[in-house]
Image (cartoon, coloured by chain):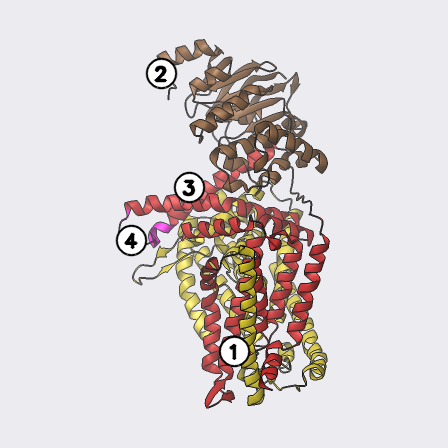
Chain colours: A red, B brown, C yellow
């Protein structure tokens, strides 16, 4: 778990450090369009499937544009799935009225809800993955500061992120030492958790004390957050405008059904 | 700049035993002094006291004739740079750029000036390529140099270093040694590495159980230490 | 217990973002007004990272063969004080949301509330602090932390159910969902509470001042009572939720009208089972019955449904193909 977590963060960080047209888009533009995309997708009523499918456009285009591989996605999907699946399956069970029949197969409201929830999960996980795989986390924190998040909170985001790898490394070293002395066992025994995590806390307090001293030595007198933002270029404005108009169009015009009708005629 | 410790006595909160007792010495401007002694002899405590992080129970730290007090602490800290033993404690911001800028920003420097100084310091240390990297993804040697950059950018007159060669492989060690050798600052370097100390420094102070055990030319002291085999790797 | 984006409606998600932002904003104000101990700044960062790592250490629950992990809210609050703990937990949740798809961007507000506000603020201030105040010792720390963790999780689980139900995306029957979630989280809470108390007791035996100072510190700062804070949060929820719902119920009309013009389809009444029951409810859920777009499959003729399905398949294939082409071009 610990190892996989830090490997997961590392792989996303390496992706974010690459270069592509999408990497070059201003982080604020990416943040805003991602939020808009999330809102647009989520705002579809639960039984609307055909209106939702065209939103596949974003992952379908952005993943290859940014050279983001599909593999890291699967793990993240697994993380997002359990709760969504529960919601989906719950809908399958509880909404059994037939919405319409396809030939002789009845399609229930629950089936529509289920499909819609799965599609949404898929799209939303994609959207966040694309954001974090093309934008370094620190850049995102700078954008949050520009959106008015208080300095203490921004500094907190930044420092938590900074010490993640340190703590993950420390914890996994402790876990290795623990499991070497307790063979044939997965994880830590519940009765040992107190001292296991307790030790890690005491070390963390000591570390935080040292960090505070290092901060003092460099003139720390209170929280501040300073960030110079990149100037948005013309391309960034066009990106936002284009993205938003596509979102609006797809949100209010059912492209799938339109194409379907065309084919039928 | 001259750095003087005058009869320093340091105790930790709530403890009776002194970590440092009656420590006195003076380091002259431009002098490089090795601080030697066993683990727990009080080296780190001494450095933290000199940096103004720990407050002595009695005695004082005197910088070019000025006693460091609470009132002038903020200004004095700018003149004394301290490099910590573990660079993970020192590099607390998430990118090298932000971390190195932390000191000057705390002292209210203008952003343009920070950029200029940063480029100068980075090229001096040969780490211009690290500027936009994430601090937690640097190697041990890179972390050490980035931490040093964060100190040097504040243009301190005195450098205090706590085991700067720990966690480093041979190559990074040499590289750091070369860099330290060219730095003009008055320096006090705590280390266990006698060979490096001998090459870098002209003088050594040995601490033992919180007291100055010996103080003199490095060659003589190291010969004496080796014969007593107090601190040998 | 991360809430998922896909089960949220924009109204519920938006409301919870506003509420959590207010709670975090209050915490920020609180710590800056009390003159935050500067030492706490790096401590919050390092302890945030600790909670992140700590949540990944699974422990085996004796006699069950299953494993659990800590949530960390009450633990953080006991070590740092409630307000720094909330801020630290909010940053852990942000990193989890971005890097691990735990929850989602819209669900971030819900998650900060369910796992942060419920534990660091409510459970800590209502349960942990009053007990620990009687004197920090092993016995009090044990009872305080077990009770606080259990209550925090119960509150959190209840919020998850409520948020899911009010969103109306997943058609989960409220009662069944509630009867599923609460007992499960009671069990989880007991186990997590015992582990949390073991951790705190260990810290207490090694460095008692860490736990004592937090309790005393919060004793000194009276300020607003927790009841007032809870009331303020409730009012805010009602206001934002109500406002967003009004907006949502107002604007589909305009949409339907324009949709009729564009696509030639008429408004379709929405009558999923949840919405039938909710149609009877007044007030908070007044926005639900008509919250529908003309694109819904339901109730439409077989022809429209087939058109929708055929069209969806074609759209997916087209966009997929386009993406494939872009990828191929970029590799050249």
Give the camera-side residue of C112 and B122. B122
The answer to if A190 sits in the magenta stretch is yes
Q: What element carries label 1?
A: helix
Which numbered mark, 1 or 2, is in the foreground of this view? 1
- From this view, report whether residue A92 is shown above or below residue A37: below
- From this view, report whether residue A65 is shown above or below residue A110: above
User: To which chain does the residue with label 4 belong?
Assistant: A
Q: Mark 4 points at which residue?
A: A185
The quadrant holding residue B208 is top left
Residue B229 — which label? 2
Q: Can residue C135 be seen in this view?
A: no
For disc 2, the neighbor class at 10 Å (few under 14, some 14 to 19, many from 20) is few
Which numbered mark, 2 or 3, is in the foreground of this view? 2
Q: Which residue in the rendered view is the most extreme toward the left?
A: A184
> Residues at badges 2 and 4 in contact (C-beta under 8 Å)?
no
> Residues at badges 1 and 4 in contact (C-beta under 8 Å)?
no
Instruction: Please give the range of residues in magenta.
Output: A182-193
Quarter of the figure that contains the C terminus of chain C: bottom right
Q: Mark 1 points at which residue?
A: A113
Q: Is mark 3 on a helix, strand or loop?
A: helix
Residue B53 image offset from top left, x and y in percent: 57, 30
Do callouts 3 and 4 point to residues on the same chain? no
Do callouts 2 and 4 point to residues on the same chain? no
Q: Is mark 2 on a helix, strand or loop?
A: loop
Give the camera-side residue of A14 and B17. A14
Which numbered mark, 1 or 4, is in the foreground of this view? 1
For disc 4, the neighbor class at 10 Å (few under 14, some 14 to 19, many from 20) is few
Q: How far apart are marks 2 and 4 (CA)?
A: 45 Å
Q: Distance between the residues labelled 1 and 2?
A: 78 Å
Residue C139 image offset from top left, x and y in percent: 41, 52
Residue B224 image offset from top left, x and y in percent: 40, 10
Q: In the image, B107: left or right of B56?
A: right
């Amino acid at each position: 778990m610990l190892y996989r977590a830090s490997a997961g963060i590392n792989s996303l960080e390496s992706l974010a450090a690459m270069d592509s047209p999408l990497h070059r888009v201003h982080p604020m533009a990416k943040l805003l369009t991602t939020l808009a995309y999330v809102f647009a997708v989520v705002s579809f009523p639960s039984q609307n499937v055909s209106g939702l499918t065209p939103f596949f456009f974003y992952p379908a285009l952005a993943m290859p544009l940014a050279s983001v591989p599909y593999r890291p996605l699967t793990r993240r999907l697994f993380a997002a799935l359990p709760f969504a699946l529960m919601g989906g399956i719950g809908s399958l069970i509880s909404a059994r009225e037939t919405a319409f029949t396809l030939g002789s197969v009845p399609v229930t409201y629950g089936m529509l809800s289920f499909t819609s929830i799965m599609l949404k999960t898929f799209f939303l996980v994609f959207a966040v993955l694309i954001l974090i795989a093309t934008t370094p986390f620190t850049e995102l924190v700078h954008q949050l500061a520009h959106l008015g998040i208080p300095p203490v909170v921004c500094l907190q985001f930044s420092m938590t992120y900074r010490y993640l790898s340190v703590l993950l490394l420390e914890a996994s070293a402790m876990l290795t030492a623990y499991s070497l002395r307790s063979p044939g066992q997965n994880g830590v025994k519940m009765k040992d958790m107190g001292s296991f995590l307790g030790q890690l806390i005491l070390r963390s307090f000591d570390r935080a004390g040292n960090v505070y001293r290092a901060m003092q030595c460099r003139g720390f007198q209170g929280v501040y957050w300073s960030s110079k933002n990149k100037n948005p270029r013309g391309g960034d404005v066009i990106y936002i405008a284009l993205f938003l108009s596509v979102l609006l169009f797809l949100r209010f015009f059912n492209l799938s059904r339109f194409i379907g009708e065309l084919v039928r005629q | 700049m001259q750095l003087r410790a005058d009869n320093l006595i340091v105790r930790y909160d709530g403890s009776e035993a002194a970590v440092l007792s009656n420590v006195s010495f003076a380091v002259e401007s431009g002098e490089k002094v090795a601080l030697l002694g066993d683990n727990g002899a009080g080296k780190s405590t001494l450095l933290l006291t000199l940096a103004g992080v720990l407050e002595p129970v009695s005695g004082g730290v005197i910088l070019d004739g000025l006693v460091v007090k609470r009132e002038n602490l903020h200004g004095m800290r700018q003149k004394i740079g301290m490099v910590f033993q573990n660079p993970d404690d020192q590099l607390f911001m998430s990118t090298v750029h932000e971390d190195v800028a932390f000191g000057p920003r705390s002292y209210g420097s203008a952003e343009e000036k920070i950029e200029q100084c940063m480029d100068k310091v980075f090229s001096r240390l040969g780490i211009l390529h690290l500027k936009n990297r994430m601090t937690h993804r640097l190697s041990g040697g890179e972390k050490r140099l980035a931490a040093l950059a964060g100190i040097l950018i504040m243009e301190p007159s005195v450098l205090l270093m706590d085991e700067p060669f720990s966690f480093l492989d041979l190559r990074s060690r040499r590289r750091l040694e070369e860099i330290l050798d060219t730095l003009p600052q008055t320096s006090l370097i705590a280390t266990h590495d006698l060979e490096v100390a001998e090459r870098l420094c002209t003088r050594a102070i040995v601490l033992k159980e919180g007291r100055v055990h010996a103080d003199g030319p490095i060659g003589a002291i190291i010969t004496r230490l080796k014969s007593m085999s107090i601190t040998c790797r | 217990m991360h809430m998922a984006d896909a089960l949220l409606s924009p109204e519920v998600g938006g409301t919870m973002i506003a509420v959590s932002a207010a709670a975090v904003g209050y915490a920020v104000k609180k710590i800056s007004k009390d003159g935050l101990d500067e030492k706490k700044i790096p401590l919050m960062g390092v302890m945030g990272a600790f909670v992140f790592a700590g949540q990944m250490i699974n422990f085996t629950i004796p006699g069950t063969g299953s494993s659990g992990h800590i949530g960390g809210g009450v633990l953080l609050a006991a070590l740092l004080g409630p307000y720094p703990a909330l801020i630290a937990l909010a940053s852990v949740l942000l990193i989890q949301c971005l890097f691990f798809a735990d929850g989602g961007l819209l669900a971030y507000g819900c998650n900060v509330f369910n796992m942060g506000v419920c534990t660091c603020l409510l459970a800590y201030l209502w349960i942990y602090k009053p007990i620990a105040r009687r004197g920090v010792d092993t016995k009090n720390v044990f009872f305080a932390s077990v009770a606080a963790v259990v209550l925090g999780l119960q509150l959190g689980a209840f919020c998850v159910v409520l948020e899911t139900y009010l969103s109306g995306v997943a058609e989960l029957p409220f009662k069944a969902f509630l009867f599923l979630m609460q007992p499960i989280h009671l069990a989880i809470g007991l186990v997590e509470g015992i582990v949390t108390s073991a951790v705190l007791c260990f810290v207490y035996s090694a460095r008692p001042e860490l736990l004592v100072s937090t309790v005393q510190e919060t004793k000194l700062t009276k300020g607003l009572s927790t009841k007032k804070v809870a009331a303020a949060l409730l009012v805010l929820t009602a206001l934002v939720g109500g406002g967003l719902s009004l907006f949502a119920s107002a604007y589909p009309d305009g949409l339907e009208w324009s949709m009729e013009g564009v696509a030639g389809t008429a408004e379709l009444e929405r009558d999923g089972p949840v919405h039938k029951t909710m149609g009877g409810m007044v007030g908070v859920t007044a926005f639900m019955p008509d919250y529908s777009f003309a694109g819904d499959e339901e109730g439409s003729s077989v022809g429209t449904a087939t058109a929708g399905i055929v069209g969806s398949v074609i759209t997916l294939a087209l966009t997929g193909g386009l993406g494939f082409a872009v990828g191929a071009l970029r590799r050249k």
